[in-house]
Image (tube, helix red, strand yellow):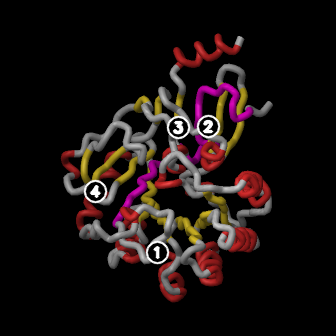
Amino acid sequence: MPLGPQKFYNRLDHHHEVAKDWVVVNWNLGNMCNFKCSYCPSILNDGSFGWNDFEVIRDFIDACVEHYHPKRVYFEFTGGEVTLWRDFVKCAEYIKGIGHDIGFISNASRTIRWWEKNKEKFDHVCLSFHAEHSDPEHFLKVVEIMSKVCRTHVNVMMHYDPTLWPVCQDVAERVISIADISLALQPLIIDFGEELYNYTDEQIKYIDDQWHLLGSKIEHTRDHSKNLYRGSMDMIDDVNGLRQNSAAHRFINDKTNNWKGWDCWAGLEQIVIDFDGSIMRGWCRVGGHFGNIKRPDMIRWPEKPIRCNKSMCHCNFDIMTKKVLPKERYEVIEDDDE
């Protein structure tokens, strides 16, 4: 029996068991970007934070791997456009060499030659289509190249502008013809806050409904079960034995992305690193900084879940983290429902 989005559940947990074997490091490597999207805050693309030296990055990677052992660590780099860093490929080779995994988020704008040359050096790539700047044909070619060699996810940033909306639709519907990819149609959020841009009701319905339509057409031709770092989440009612699967963006669309007062596993199964090297549990910044990559010896690693104090969880990365409602709270909710 499925749960509706407003029904009681006391645990949000990973749908795929293998995801629990990984720790995910989401790392803002630098804020230099060759795109200047209107919906992207300038802090993510103005180049005000330079790239760190490779040795600084390497030393923190070693500290992180040592702390979370025996779990494997998946390092996911974002920015900015991380492929612009001169040592990015060298960093990927290092991570692979010590037996852990690397992925990154990219706008796919590097040349086809760059992608062909380096395609074997990554375990996962998330390619984001931005209609204001992306060349659809170039973007689709990169998706095709990478999908043949590593786990590939595509985010189509669904632009609300009536002239760009059909471009996004076309790319999304062409992407699904490429084997072995996953796809998400992402709504744009104003300043990464709590409000969506001015979408029409029809556009919101397309984003919401099309997720299921497109998802049903995607077939993975290779076994990715060993490196499924993240995925959809299950809303679990441990009291009544009910469970419903959902994707991060649906919580945002449905405005059900509120887990204030819940215990969150951010810091235990994920950490994030900001442009200045500050280390936090999540992009929500609950609990504040607990160290900096430039001083690995001074890091105060989290040892237990943290109680959420935010009214909204608006980052897909943070949503895809285990969360548990304390028992004293859901007993009160059950009493209210009777």
SS of the residue at dot 4?
A: loop
Task: Report x, y in % for residue 80.
Answer: 41, 68
Please tell me which residue lies in front, 76 or 92: 76
- Neighbourhood count class around disc 2 (C-alpha, 10 Å): few under 14, some 14–19, many 20 upward: few
Q: Residue at x 65, y 24 (%)?
A: 238
- Which contiguous range is marked in magenta? 4-30
Q: CA distance from mark 1 to mark 4?
A: 23 Å
Q: Alpha-carbon neighbours of circle 1 within 10 Å: few (<14), some, or many (≥20)?
A: some
Q: Amino acid at mark 1?
A: Phe
Q: Quadrant of residue 258?
A: top right
Q: Is residue 12 magenta?
A: yes
Instruction: List the residue tagged with mark 2.
Output: 256
- Secondary structure at badge 1 equals loop
Query: Of the residues tagged 2 and 4, which is closer to the observer?
Result: 2
Q: Residue at x 25, y 51 (%)?
A: 292
Asked whether disc 2 touches disc 4, contact meaning CB atoms under 8 Å apart, the reply is: no
Q: Residues within 10 Å of mark 3 (few under 14, many from 20)?
A: many
Q: Reading the chain from its start, which is encountered first: label 2 or label 1?
A: 1
Q: Are marks 1 and 4 in contact (CB under 8 Å)?
A: no
For the residues labelled 3 and 4, the Cα–Cα distance comes to 25 Å
Name the residue that disc number 4 marks. 277
Depth order, front residue of 191/152: 191
Q: Alpha-carbon distance for marks 2 and 4?
A: 31 Å
